């Protein structure tokens, strides 16, 4: 589906996405939508007065208490409404209960807030024909108490105590458990599951694998008739029948597992059943309404309570218990435990394992082909692996989210009524809210709820692989069952009324442009529909956050938590109003993105020229107010000319204003408000052109001091709209590109390192408020203490800075060069500065020449162990000095932006800690790549097949297959120089022998490969030209055509 050389070829996964888009087949009906945590969420709290969901619904309740609003599990799959769920549980014969869900600390328990304490990885995922998940399960007793007690002992200046610190993985005494899910070629309702477990330790060890299938409890609340209650029932030794009034009749068919003990006998599953109902007797000393409850499997398997499961083998929750403990358990190394089963509409009692494994292999190869064509240019294998796992994490973080305000506030007919004060606290004005959708979550465990501005960043990466899903996310938040009638977008579950930065318009236009660039589709209906709703949201911002009509905005914390001297969500202890440089910068940015969208729409409907004129003029007024306020002599504004930086300021009305000189992202965010206008586009829109010219003539004073210059044209005769002129831009960049201030080895810090030695403080009414440079975890409890904007690196804001620099480059070209880093003597244009920052961000994840990844913080196991080193965690933020990963570990939302950066600049990314190559050396490097990969007219060769998990029909054991790599990795084999001769050769393609192609398909693929080769050749030629000083004027910024309205698509 990505278009190369004006040629479109659909991979198998893209064909499925097209069928889903055209609604001919519902390929996304089943997916990885089960949350990794439902306990202790905001909506689960029954005590609205204090909102303490952590203590109201703790982890120890989760196995015995029914969830009201969703389900959770390990590697879970469910339908789009979370009605029927399949997930996995394990037992090592040491733990006091089954490992049924992932464990972490609550906010009060953690020394840096809530934090997961597990080792799991999102290895692979397409949308969603193939999924792969890795869980590392200790063979010793899981250290629940040790993690709780040690983290409680530590303070905010100490590092978190993680599961790797406990010693539970010493001597490799753990299981690598790979969980794969695939769908049949032509039927999205046919799901295959395979679990492969490897004993990494030195001795035999027992393992119990217990896949579970259950229904979300919809019957206990008094909202459905008893006749609609679903059921599960054993109809054979290895077959479970499922009946649901919405999903229909389905069957779970299990295959015996190959024996791994001395006897060689197969391991047959034992089917057990219970009900997904709360154990009220255990939790509340209230007799259970019936004997079989949610925690029945724990009590039956671990405690040996035979009466805990239903002997009639029926219920709403079922499990298949596979026991691998013969002769002390599974031997290490050479043996793999394998569990296979199918979830199907077909009532059959036979599972063909050879066919099953071939289909799994095929789906893996199709996933390889799909992802290769997203980023076909040559790049390091390590970067390609990072990108692939970032994409996978984006997919695994899609979850079913259910929240209906009316039912939450008023309670359920069959349950005790909620406390009356629930209706009068947070979220009380969101009575219209009705969420029952698949949403992209910021983190699969720590943040199992949407956050509006996070979602906007998610959609950039999602648009590369599934534009339809990305567009739906952005559209949903503007629909009437999400967006408030007053125009405000919901922020997040804990407080929908909080104010997030207004990035929705930016994300909408970027997704529109990404889809058009990568896939050749132009969805104007999407653009227009969201644009019209955003007009209401823009008006809400203007009316609510600029109450005096000065075009200088407030906004509160704006997603930056503890970045300010004061809590920006509360009234100032000084009195007065906080005028925020970032809030005003965000609104100018919002204006320009609405302008961009209006200009794009005006190419098709001229009525939008008037709206474009409105946003053009509004931007000019915001820009003028941010710098000149009332236009009076010697007045103070948010700009400090002496420091060359923007600051927040406290205003007491009139001329009474005091700047708060904290050098933070607050002063960099005004750079986001940048836009270039092509003269060809303006000439095509006569009404807009006329209005711009009128404004220049009649408001020349405002226009000239707030625009770089509408008369001075830049590269390509472009016009620049920006909050900063060249002088101010240069001053800000002098601080941003100084390694003693904002620039680190791994990107741009959120607070200048200057404040390490020069913290800023203010005494107010006997209380001291202070901001200092803290590169790692937060040293305060502000906003929960689990994030920090006083020094660490955050990818989302870096991504916007990179785009801003690219926009500036589109205007200035080679004419503006700055020293980068400051003091290095190396000058470069802003396009190269943007690329340099992207490379530094990639260095967070990429191995350096010593084999270390900065995100791992020097941990030898994560860096060097063969069973850990190729798997990555995508952290929420990163240490401003070392790059060590911090916060949530599966923040694949905005940290997943690294996939886009690798796509744009991975081909030129050097190793971390390698000195930046001089330009002449880079030119030689690209010339070398060009000749090795793009020279001549060579015909792409058929790629080799990767290692397949081919079944041995005699033993049915994975370990007996000679072509399987025992480290569990599928596609990280080192390639020799001969093997790497062509990027097309290196593609893992469905042209392998497992898939097989007809003569016609083979010819189509050959033609497609030639077009792909032509594309690679042209792109490498472009990059070669970009590095050539002699042809610098022809330089093109990667992705530059993606973010501006242009005269032609």
Image (cartoon, grey):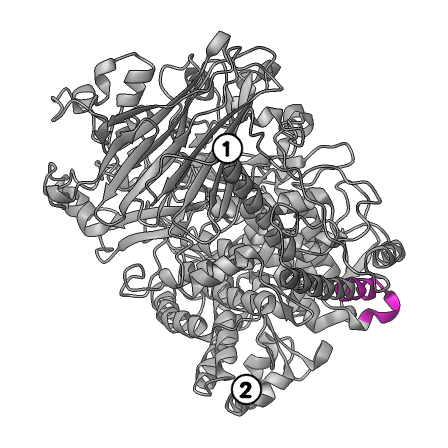
Is 153 one of the magenta-colored residues? no
Chief SS of the magenta region: helix
Residue drawn at the location 17% of the way across and 24% of the way down: 280
Quadrant holding the N terminus = bottom right
* Magenta span of residues: 1018-1032
Q: Answer above or below: position of 317 versus 658.
A: above
Quadrant (top left, top right, bottom left, bottom right) of the C terminus: bottom right
Q: Is residue 322 above or below residue 897?
A: above
Residue 181, numbered label: none
Tally the marks: 2
In this rendering, the label closer to the viewer, 2 or 1: 2
In this view of the protein, can residue 958 be seen by the observer?
A: yes
Residue identified by numbered label 2: 692
Location of residue 758 (image quadrant) = top right
Q: Residue 575 at what x, y percent from top left?
A: 37, 52
Magenta stretch holds residue 1026: yes
How crowded pointer 2 is (Cα within 10 Å; few <14, some 14-19, many 20+) is rated as some
Distance of mark 2 from mark 1, alpha carbons?
A: 50 Å
Q: Position of residue 72 (x, y in %)?
A: 35, 36
Q: Quadrant of residue 1029?
A: bottom right
Could you say which is closer to the camera, residue 163 or residue 1004?
A: 1004
Spot occupied by residue 949 in the image (x, y as percentages of width and height)? 59, 35
Give neighbour class at mark 1: few <14, some 14-19, many 20+ (Cα, 10 Å). Answer: some
SS at badge 2: helix
Q: Is residue 787 above or below residue 473?
A: above
For image coordinates 62% across by 51% down, the residue present is: 996
| Closest to the observer, 244 or 50 | 244
Horizontal arrangement in the rendering, residue 89 relative to residue 1026 (left or right): left
Relative side of 1026 to 403, left or right? right
* Residue with the mark numbered 1: 779
Q: Position of residue 459 (x, y in %)?
A: 49, 57
At mark 1, the secondary structure is: loop
């Amino acid at each position: 589906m990505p278009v190369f050389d004006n040629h479109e070829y659909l991979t198998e996964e893209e064909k499925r996405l097209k069928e889903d888009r055209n609604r001919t087949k519902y390929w996304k009906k089943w997916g990885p939508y089960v949350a990794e945590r439902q306990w202790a969420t905001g909506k689960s709290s029954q005590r609205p007065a204090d909102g303490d969901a952590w203590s109201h619904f703790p982890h120890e309740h989760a196995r015995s208490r029914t969830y009201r609003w969703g389900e959770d599990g390990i590697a879970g799959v469910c339908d789009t409404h979370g009605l029927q769920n399949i997930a996995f549980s394990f037992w090592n014969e040491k733990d006091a209960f089954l490992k049924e869900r992932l464990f972490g600390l609550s906010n009060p328990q953690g020394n840096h807030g809530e934090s997961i304490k597990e080792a799991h990885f999102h290895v692979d995922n397409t949308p969603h024909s193939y999924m792969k998940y890795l869980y590392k399960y200790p063979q010793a007793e899981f250290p629940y108490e040790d993690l709780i007690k040690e983290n409680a002992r530590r303070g905010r200046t100490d590092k978190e105590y993680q599961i790797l610190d406990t010693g539970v993985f010493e001597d490799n005494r753990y299981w690598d458990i790979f969980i794969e899910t695939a769908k049949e070629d032509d039927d999205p309702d046919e799901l295959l599951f395979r679990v492969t477990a490897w004993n990494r330790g030195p001795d035999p060890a027992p393992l119990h694998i217990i896949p579970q299938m259950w229904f979300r409890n919809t019957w206990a609340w008094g909202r459905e008739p008893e006749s609609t209650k679903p059921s599960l029932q054993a109809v054979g030794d290895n077959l479970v029948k499922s009946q649901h009034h919405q999903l229909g009749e389905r069957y779970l068919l299990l295959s015996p597992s190959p024996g791994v003990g001395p006897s060689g006998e197969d391991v047959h599953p034992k089917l057990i059943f219970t009900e997904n109902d709360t154990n009220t007797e255990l939790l509340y000393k209230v007799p259970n309404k019936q004997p079989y409850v949610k925690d029945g499997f724990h009590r039956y398997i671990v405690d040996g309570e035979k009466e805990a499961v239903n002997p009639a083998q029926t219920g709403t929750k079922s499990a298949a218990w596979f026991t691998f403990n013969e002769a002390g358990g599974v031997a290490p190394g050479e043996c793999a435990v394998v569990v296979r089963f199918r979830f199907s509409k077909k009532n059959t009692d036979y599972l063909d394992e050879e066919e099953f494994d071939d289909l799994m292999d095929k789906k893996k190869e199709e996933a390889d082909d799909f992802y290769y064509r997203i980023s076909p240019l040559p790049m390091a294998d390590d970067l390609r692996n990072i990108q692939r796992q970032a994409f996978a994490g984006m997919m695994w973080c899609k979850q079913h989210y259910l929240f209906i305000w009316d039912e939450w506030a008023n309670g359920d007919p069959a349950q005790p009524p909620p406390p009356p004060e629930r209706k009068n606290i947070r979220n009380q004005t969101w009575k219209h809210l009705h969420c029952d959708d698949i949403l992209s979550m910021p983190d699969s465990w720590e943040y199992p709820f949407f956050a509006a501005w996070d979602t906007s960043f998610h959609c950039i990466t999602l648009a590369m692989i599934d534009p339809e899903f990305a567009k739906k996310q952005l559209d949903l938040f503007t629909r009437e069952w999400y967006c408030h009638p007053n125009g405000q977008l919901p922020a997040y579950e804990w407080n929908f009324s909080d104010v997030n930065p207004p990035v929705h318009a930016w994300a909408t236009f970027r997704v529109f442009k990404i889809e058009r660039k990568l896939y050749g589709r132009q969805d104007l209906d999407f653009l227009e529909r969201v644009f019209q709703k955003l007009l209401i949201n823009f008006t809400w911002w203007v009316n609510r956050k600029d109450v005096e009509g000065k075009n200088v905005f407030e906004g509160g914390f704006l997603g930056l938590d503890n970045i300010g001297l004061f809590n920006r969500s509360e009234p100032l202890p000084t009195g007065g109003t906080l005028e925020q440089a970032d809030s005003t910068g965000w609104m100018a940015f919002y204006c320009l993105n609405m302008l961009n969208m209006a200009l794009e729409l005006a190419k098709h409907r001229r009525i939008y020229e008037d709206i474009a004129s409105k946003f053009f003029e509004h931007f000019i007024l915001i820009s003028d107010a941010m710098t000149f306020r009332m236009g009076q002599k010697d007045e103070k504004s948010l700009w400090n000319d002496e420091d060359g930086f923007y600051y927040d300021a406290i205003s007491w009305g009139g001329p009474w204003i005091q700047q708060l000189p904290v050098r933070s992202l607050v002063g960099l965010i005004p750079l986001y408000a940048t836009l270039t206008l092509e003269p060809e586009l303006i000439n095509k829109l006569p009404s807009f052109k006329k209005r711009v010219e009128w404004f220049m003539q009649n408001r020349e004073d405002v226009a000239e001091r707030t625009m770089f210059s509408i008369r001075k044209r830049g590269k390509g005769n472009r016009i620049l709209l920006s909050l900063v002129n060249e002088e101010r831009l240069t001053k800000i960049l002098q601080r941003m590109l100084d390694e003693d201030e904002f620039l680190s080895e791994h990107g741009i810090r959120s607070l200048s390192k200057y404040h390490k030695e020069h913290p800023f403080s203010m005494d107010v009414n006997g209380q001291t408020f202070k901001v200092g440079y803290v590169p790692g975890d937060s040293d305060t409890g502000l906003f929960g203490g689990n994030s920090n904007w006083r020094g660490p690196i955050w990818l989302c804001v870096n991504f916007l800075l990179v785009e801003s620099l690219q926009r500036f480059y589109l205007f200035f070209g080679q004419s503006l060069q700055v020293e980068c880093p400051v003091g290095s003597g190396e000058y470069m244009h802003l396009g190269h500065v943007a690329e340099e920052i992207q490379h530094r961000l990639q260095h967070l994840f990429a191995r350096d020449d010593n084999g270390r990844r900065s995100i791992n913080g020097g941990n030898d196991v994560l860096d060097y162990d063969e069973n850990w080193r190729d798997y990555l965690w995508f952290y929420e933020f990163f240490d401003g000095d070392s790059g060590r990963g911090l916060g949530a570990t599966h923040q694949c939302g905005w940290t997943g932006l690294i996939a886009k950066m690798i796509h744009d600049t991975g081909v030129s990314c050097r190793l971390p800690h390698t000195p930046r190559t001089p330009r002449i050396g880079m030119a030689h490097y690209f010339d070398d790549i060009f000749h090795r990969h793009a020279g001549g007219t060579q015909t792409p060769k058929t790629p080799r097949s990767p290692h397949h998990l081919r079944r041995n029909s005699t033993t049915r054991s994975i370990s007996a297959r000679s072509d399987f790599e025992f480290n569990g990795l599928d596609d990280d084999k080192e390639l020799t120089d001969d093997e790497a001769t062509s990027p097309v050769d290196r593609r893992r393609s469905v042209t392998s022998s497992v898939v097989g192609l007809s003569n016609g398909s083979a010819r189509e693929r050959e033609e497609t490969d030639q077009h792909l080769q032509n594309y690679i050749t042209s792109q490498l030629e472009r990059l070669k030209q970009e590095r050539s000083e002699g042809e610098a004027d022809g330089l093109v910024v990667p992705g530059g055509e993606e973010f501006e309205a242009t005269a032609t698509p």
